Structures are given as C-alpha cells and as structure tokens.
Image (tube, rainbow, N blue to C red):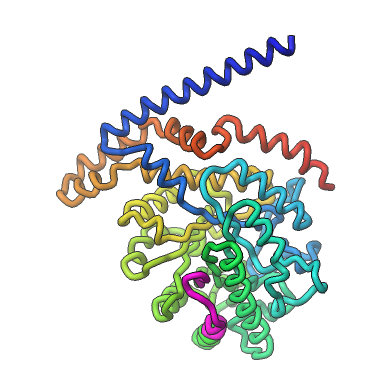
Amino acid sequence: MSEEKNLWEKIGEVAETLNTEARYEAAKQLYAGIGVDTDAAIEKLSNVTVSLHCWQGDDVRGFDTDPSKPLTGGIQTTGNYPGRARTPEELMADYEKVLSLCPGKKKLNLHASYAIFDEGGFVDRDKIEPKHFSKWVEFAKKNGIGLDFNPTFFSHPNMKNGLTLSSPDEKNRKFWIDHGKACVRIAEYFAKETGIPCVMNIWIGDGYKDIPADRKGPRERYKDSIEQIISEPHDPKQVKITVESKVFGIGVESYTAGSAEFTLLFAATHPGILPLMDNGHYHPTEMVSDKISSLLCYFDEIALHITRPVRWDSDHVVILDDETKEIAKEIVRNGDSLDRVNIALDYFDASINRISAWTVGFRSLQKALLMALCTPNKEFKKLQDTNQLTKLMAKQEELKVYPFGDVWEEYLLKNDAPSELSWYNEVEKYEKEVLSKRV
C-alpha cells in the first residue's frame, strides 16, 4: 500500500510540473504580446541582490547586551511568539532555513550588536574588531553571500539622555565616534573576505521628546561625528557608507538630529557617501517611491531599507502592497537602475513565526521586482510622453489581471525555491522540529 501511495504521489508531482510548464508557456505568450520577455525578466531578477536583515530572527536583541533588558533608543518589538533565536548558532540556523525558502541572490545584513565574543572575551562597542565577526564571515562564505553592516547606536548604557553622535558630552560622543570607526574597519574586512562590497549604514535615533531650545547644535555635532567616522581609511568602492534619516521615534517625537534634509544634504556634499531611504522614516503621506527618481538624477548610487509602516515607523513585515510595488517599479523603470540601488529589507515582528516573517517579506519584494520587470515600461512611457493618458490608464489596469502568478512560479522553479503553495509547509515543519523546543 505504501509503495502504491508513493507511486501516485510521484505521478501527481509529474502532472503538477507539466501543468506548471504549460501555464508558464501560455503566460509567456500573453506577455510577449505586449512586448515583455518573461524569460529575460526571470534571468535579470535572478541576478539582483537583496540584503536580508538578521534582526528579524531575535527581535533586535543582538549578543552584546543583556537580552532581559528592554530595547532603547527608539527601537521596539511587539509580541513574544515562541522560538526566538537566543544564540549565534540558533540565529544562523534560522537564517539558513530562510535562505532555502527564498529565491534569488542575497546578502546578510548585520548590526554591530551581533558581535560574537569567543576570542578574548567581551569588549565594548568602541573596541570591536574584525575577529568578533569572523564566524559571520565563515557563515557568509559557506552560503555564498555578501555582508552588509550597521553600527549600533541604540540599546546601550552610553546612550546618555538618548543621545549618541549628537551628544554635547564630548567624552560620550567620542565613544560613539570610535564605535563608528571600528565599524568602518569591520565593513572593509567583510568586503575583502567575501569579495563583495559592503554597505555600511549610519543611523541614529538621537532627538528630543518635546520642542528643543537648540536645533542646530545637535546637528552640527552629528555632522562632525560622521565626518570623523568616514575619515577612517577605507576603499569607497568596497565600503559603501550610507546615511539614513528619520522623521521621529519613540521618545523623540518633536525633533530628530538626523532629519531627511540633514542626511540628504550630508550625502550630497560628501563624495562617496550614499543617501539611504527607509520608507518608514518619513511623514505618513510621503512616499519613498516618489523620491527614488529624484535621487537618481543626482547620485550614481542610492540605498533603500524597505519596510511596511502602519501609521508610523512600525516595521511591519513587508507584503505585496501598493508602495512596495511602486518602489520596485521606480527602481526598474528609471533607466533600469537595479545596479544603482542597494536594496535591503528592515522589519521585525515578534508576534508571528519569525521564519515566516522573513520569508514573506523577502518573497514579497521579489514578486514586486518581477512584476516591475514584466511591465512594458517603454511602451507606457511612450504613451505618457505622447499624452495618450486615457490609453495608459486602460493598459495599466489591463496588466493587473495578467497571469503573473505563473511567471512567479517559473522564477521559483528556475531558482530552486519552493513553490508558493509549499513553502509554508517547510515553516510549519521547522517550527515543530526546532523552534518549539526553544524554551
């Protein structure tokens, strides 16, 4: 009976494969009718790198502070779903599981707080060295991925009065400057070891809860601090330093030193520094998708942290919503800027299965990018430029009901990733066998 069952299962698998192939061929012909080469779109997306953040797996806890203490500095996670990674080994195992569920090229995005202190014991953030991240380099090499990096300017006793690089306490500010410099050295180590450039992002949550008496002073100190950090010798082609803004944060509702204007102007006036936009770090009616084309007019490269804000910078799991699709469109159709935009994900949800959260976010962004690549962008642009706006609207709406799902399944097949219908079974199995045992 068992052999007979296995035979029918195999027959079913073959039938499903044949059905998938037939559906893709039909979809391919339909898209070809509007000038879209789906094979070329799949091939192009297969070579697009997306940086997947490590901090979804352990609720931004890291390994250099007491995990029983609350997060500080504008960082907050909600929920206590079972299975949070508690050690580097658990986090790496979880991350590898996600890699197996997601198609395409990846990088691992690390925060400095994920240093591993096996060699020589603990050191504070101003003294971290490449050796404290050697296991992450081994992990990256094992999985054939690059590494991105972030100094951690939050959740630390030296966040005096909620300030780091903008602090009026010069001794305290120096601690954080030294931390930033140490991170530049580590980022260069990552690039040299993996052979893949490392994006190093500078973001601080410094600010004030109520109306400040001095707005300029903190920003002058912040500017000086970043300038000292980027003076650390490095190859800008290998270490891509970015600066990220934020409109407000928890406890700093009235003022942040690193505003959008501040970071954008800093990047524009300091050669080799890239602007990084997080689409949760603006006013609710501001859309990063609308800003991408402006920045690409002036910068050779830019960087993105893609998240999902719900009423504020709440870092919900990325889904295939309108803004994610619009961001992808702007990356693809602006002169095909996939090689000019450094794409990373940034969210953390502790209320649901973390493996699923990682996977849903990554696959959703990949879907958005593939959708953008399966759009007749040149034809749509021509309709706009010739003022055929009625036809443009009609054609854009028509495209929404094209069989994109069949193209997506072909992309998954070509990249050895589980289908849309089967990947969650792997998550449930992993939860039962691994996550449920973390008590």
Which corner quadrant holds the N terminus?
top right
Name the residue rendered at 66%, 32% in the picture.
425
Place of residue 406 in the rendered image (x, y in percent of width and height, measured from the top left): 44, 30
Magenta highlight on residue 144: no
Nearer to me, 117 or 217: 117
Name the residue rendered at 53%, 87% in the picture.
224
Place of residue 19 in the rendered image (x, y in percent of width and height, measured from the top left): 47, 21
Q: Residue furthest right?
A: 439
Name the residue rendered at 61%, 18% in the picture.
10
Q: In the image, is residue 397 above or below residue 230?
A: above
**Residue 120, picture quadrant:** bottom right
Side of 219 relative to 88 (left or right): left
Side of 265 relative to 201 (left or right): left
**Residue 209, picture quadrant:** bottom right
Q: Residue furthest left?
A: 386
Residue 389 visible somewhere in the drawing: yes
**Residue 340, picture quadrant:** bottom left
Place of residue 90 in the rendered image (x, y in percent of width and height, measured from the top left): 76, 52
Name the residue rendered at 34%, 61% in the picture.
293
Residue 212 visible somewhere in the drawing: no
Side of 367 relative to 389 (left or right): right
Nearer to me, 240 or 280: 240
Please give the range of residues in magenta. Answer: 227-241
Nearer to me, 408 or 393: 408
